[in-house]
Image (cartoon, helix red, strand yellow):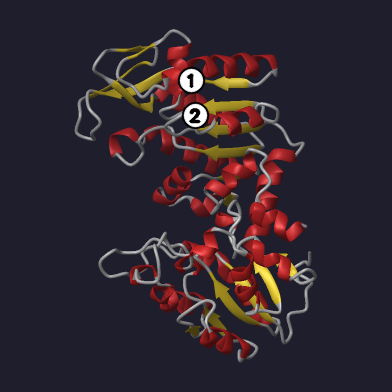
């Protein structure tokens, strides 16, 4: 494994796996959010500035085959060129003769983009012969696609074996790993994790791992009502996973045994329908009437969470406190976001990860006021759970 900061790229063709699976307008096929392209730009520009050429490799969506032109990476070439400030050439394939010829003739400072690797089923099956052809596009391999690092696909994992002495992480993956490791392994205290979202079942492994690390664990979102019901509270029509009531009880017991302050919401904003126009009121979270459902934490809980966060040195936020997409149920999530921003300004390290948390911090225009916003999604969750990610292992060896 090489270090991108010290590696000599002069005269090298660099095959770089990025995650350009960007959101697009379904009608016009225009990129609606180029965050992932901008996130990979520092790595690509570093290679170019140091005398290398770049072959960009990515997937886009989940096409059945190459007949689905709406998934063609040609649709994002223009945006990529604008972000990089370089005219990006496009290969109409990722393994064809013409594509290989184009990459072979690249000059230092030039950039080309391969066609969607998922047009071939061999990508997702991790077929070695497919990866071997992909590897012919470069002298060096850089993996900068943290968002796909949990997939043992040909372009994310298998291709690395064809670069035994010339493979490395890009700056994006380095930042992701460093940020998560800082939260999980730092000795700074107190460490607070805010875990929200809809279901306990999707966060069990993360919660169990965090109980060995954190000082404070704040539970929010739909999963909170499973904990409330497990404690004997009345939750009305709120989202509850009855199959996980015993699990919730065990988590509460384990937290107490490990000295972790587990904060379950004490009040909640309830509605008589899942709608921003529904009737709403604030009640004790253990006394939700039948026919009503909890859709956000209450003002008391929001204030208590903000107080805990303000006194923290390390903060991990994974999952919103309520249905923040609806204006009437976003106050709790806004309060947590603002508290994290304030704590960061005072010197705390804050890591935001998980699709909904990232969406929330972006919606509130606060992404540049926290320490790190993960692009990883599922990969970050699995890394937090302690799983070995195939894309990471393939580089580290």
Residue 217 locus on image (x, y percent): 59, 27
Q: In which quarter of the image is residue 258?
A: top right
Q: In which quarter of the image is residue 103?
A: bottom right
Residue 303 locus on image (x, y percent): 47, 26
Query: Disc 2 and disc 1: Cα gap in Å?
Result: 7 Å
Q: For the residue carrying disc 1, how many other residues have a C-alpha within 10 Å: few (<14), some (14-19), or many (20+)?
A: some
Residue 79 locus on image (x, y percent): 43, 75
Residue 201's disc number: 2
Q: In this view, does 156 lie above or below 73?
A: above
Task: Report helix, strand or loop for mark 2.
Answer: loop
Can residue 349 be seen in the rendering of this structure?
no
Identify the residue at horizontal 36%, vertical 24% (top origin): 239
Identify the residue at horizontal 59%, vertical 19% (top origin): 251
Choose between 181 and 76: the one closer to the eye. Answer: 76
Q: In this view, does 242 lie above or below 318?
A: above
Residue 73's disc number: none
Q: Is residue 207 left or right of residue 329?
A: right
Quickly name the residue at label 1: 244
Identify the residue at horizontal 71%, vertical 83% (top origin): 12
Q: In which quarter of the image is residue 1?
A: bottom right
């Amino acid at each position: 494994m090489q270090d991108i900061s010290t590696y000599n790229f002069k005269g090298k063709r660099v095959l770089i796996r990025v995650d350009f699976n960007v959101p697009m307008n379904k009608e016009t096929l225009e990129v609606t959010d180029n965050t992932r392209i901008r996130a990979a730009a520092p790595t690509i520009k570093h290679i170019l500035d140091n005398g290398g050429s770049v072959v960009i490799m990515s997937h886009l969506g989940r096409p059945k085959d190459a007949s689905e032109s709406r998934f063609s990476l040609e649709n994002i070439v223009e945006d990529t060129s604008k972000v990089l400030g370089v005219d990006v050439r496009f290969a109409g394939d990722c393994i064809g003769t013409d594509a290989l010829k184009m990459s072979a003739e690249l000059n230092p400072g030039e950039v080309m983009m391969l066609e969607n690797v998922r047009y071939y089923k061999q990508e997702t099956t991790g077929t070695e012969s497919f990866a071997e052809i992909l590897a012919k596009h470069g002298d060096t391999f850089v993996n900068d696609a943290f968002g796909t690092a949990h997939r043992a696909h040909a372009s994310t994992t298998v291709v690395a074996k064809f670069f035994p002495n010339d493979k490395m992480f890009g700056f994006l993956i380095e930042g992701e790993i460093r940020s998560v490791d800082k939260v999980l392994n730092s000795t700074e205290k107190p460490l607070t994790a805010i875990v929200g979202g809809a279901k306990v079942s999707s966060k069990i492994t993360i919660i169990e791992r965090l109980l060995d690390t954190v000082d404070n664990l704040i539970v929010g979102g739909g999963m909170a009502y499973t904990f409330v019901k497990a404690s004997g509270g009345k939750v009305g029509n709120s989202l509850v996973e009855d199959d996980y009531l015993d699990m919730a009880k065990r988590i509460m017991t384990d937290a107490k045994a490990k000295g972790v302050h587990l904060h379950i919401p004490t009040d909640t904003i309830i509605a008589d329908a899942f709608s921003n126009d529904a009737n709403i009121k604030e009640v004790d979270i253990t006394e939700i009437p039948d026919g009503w459902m909890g859709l956000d934490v209450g003002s008391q809980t929001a204030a208590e969470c903000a107080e805990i966060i303000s006194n923290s040195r390390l903060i991990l936020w994974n999952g919103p406190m309520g249905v923040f997409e609806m204006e009437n149920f976003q106050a709790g999530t806004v309060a947590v976001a603002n508290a994290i921003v304030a704590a960061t300004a005072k010197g705390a390290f804050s890591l935001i990860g998980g699709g909904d948390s990232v969406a929330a911090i972006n919606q509130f225009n606060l992404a540049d006021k926290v320490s790190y916003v993960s692009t990883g999604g599922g990969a970050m969750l699995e890394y937090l759970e302690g799983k070995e990610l195939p894309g990471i292992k393939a580089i580290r060896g």
